Amino acid sequence: MLDHLYINAAYIVAAAFFIFGLKLLGKPVTARKGNLFSAVGMLIAIIATLLSNQILDWNWILLGVAIGIVIGVAASRLIAMTAMPEMVAVFNGLGGGASLLVGWVALFGTVNLFVAITVVLSILIGGMTFSGSAIAWGKLSEAITSRALVFAGQRFVNSGILIALITCAVMFVLEPAHNSPYLYAVIGLACLLGIMAVIPIGGADMPVVISLLNSYSGLAACAAGFAINNVILIVAGSLVGAAGFILTNVMCKAMNRSLPNVLFSGFGAAKAATEVDGEVHPISAEDATLILEAASSVAFVPGYGMAVAQAQHVLCELGELLESNGTEVSYAIHPVAGRMPGHMNVLLAEANVSYDQLIEMDDINPRLDSIDVAVVIGANDVVNPAARTDENSPIYGMPIINVDEAKTVFVLKRTMASGFAGIDNPLFFGSNTRMLFGDAKTSISAMISEFKT
Amino acid sequence: MEAILLGLILLLSIFLGFELISKVPATIHTPLMSGANAISGITLVGALLAAGAGAASPRLAILLGVIAVAFATINVVGGYLVTDRMLGMFKKRGDNG
């Protein structure tokens, strides 16, 4: 009883650290401290658990923890910032997988109806998070195609899996046992459902999926907490679940789509946009540099293409050169630019761009008409004015960065191929648009050396 | 009664989570996500209890527990470290470094 009391007291302290940590994590100035606070909360929860007299054998724990620390430390140190979306996907998946296993092990103890139901939930959510994250990792690292995989009858197959899953779950709950065949079926079907859920989602929708999986990994921990009757799992898990859900919502709003639409539609198969005819005006790096030199304000608009070309460092260098020339430089970031929430911000921060220069879409749009040059680097759909004007466009209604309102627009682009959504971009044919063809990094480097001469 | 109490805790935590996160600037969405992800590694607590249950516990349960400990530890350790590494890069002009 005493044991029980002191552990729960420690959990309350840990919960306070998590809550305070999350609060501090919400502001750029205090975020690092917030992360530290939450890590201290985690440490308190872990130590309290280890000291409890429910722990009888340390050997196995040491083995698991040692493996985890070696891999965790190595991964966090070695990973490149451009690969951060993959990393977050992997961590999400492992958290979900762990919650699945915790739920499973709970079946070896005394099992009543409540435990059986919550175990099924933790296995279901944990399994989906695990396999869904694995697929998300594959798509993000291009190990499998990042295109939306849609096939005829997908909905029927998925409904079939879901019905089978619910049936097995009910059968299991009616007669719960740790070696019930229905248990294995639920585990297998949950993983299958996770795979099927992420396969039809394309690369540009990944920010939504990553934040949703993040939410799931929290909910899985929460369900496992119910299964083993542990308060801190419930509190921390549901905090993460709520946080992930809010981010998911922000991402959906930034694409003007509902969550079901992102999850079930595949994308691009819908309406055909009005075709755009017109003339493209190419420009050389030399001429582009001359215009930039004369500009008094420049806004860079990065997209996933910047990450692919690894152009963030040269971009920052160009920005600094322009600033020393007296130009006002800002970076306009669309919420869903890149492959995860805030992807562009992380890359630019890595390249030493001050975060007060990173401007959100809603703040830059009202003053774009006063900006001399907007430079679009590897972004397409998030600057496509068809979203405002063409009701037939699949992205109609999506909020965009209105670069076409700037006095001059440079678009750094490999070729004239259309963006992820596979639709034409009228921006490229605008009379104030100049296309700078070629690899973004090469083009920017060329401008830098022009600038220096 | 226990279930009701736990349900109440769940409800309050979810509302608290919504309140804490609802006004986060887009600039730090990624660190926020990976920091939250590290917190979801709290399932490690459950995994420790499973792996440390001792000789009375069946072999399979211990094995599952050890795998869960390894998974959750990667999630916790890697998650916090990588978030810290990212946040260390966010600088305002005039800051040291």
Image (cartoon, coloured by chain):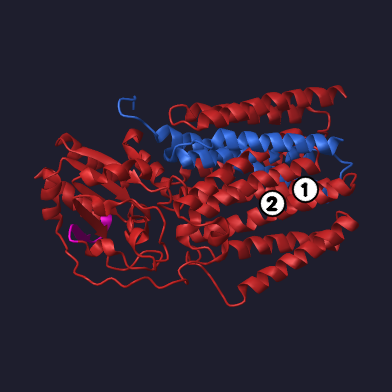
Q: In which quarter of the image is the N terminus of chain B?
A: top right
| Residue underneath mark 2 | A126
Q: Position of residue A199 (x, y in %)?
A: 56, 65
Q: Image point 48% across, 42% down: which residue?
A: B30
The magenta stretch spans residue A432: yes
Region rendered in magenta: A431-440
Q: Which chain is home to disc 2? A: A
Relative to the observer, which residue lies in front, A134 or A410? A410
Q: Image point 11% across, 54% down: which residue?
A: A287
| Residue underneath mark 1 | A103
Q: Image point 40% across, 64% down: which residue?
A: A420
Q: What element carries label 2?
A: helix
User: Crowding at label 2, few (<14), some or many (≥20) Cα neighbours within 10 Å?
Assistant: many
The magenta stretch spans residue A260: no
Check disc 2 and give the amino acid type: Gly
- First-in-chain label (2 vs 1): 1
Q: What element carries label 1?
A: helix
Toward which corner of the image does residue A359 lie, by quadrant? Answer: top left
Rendered blue, the chain in question is: B
Relative to the observer, which residue lies in front, A71 or A262? A262
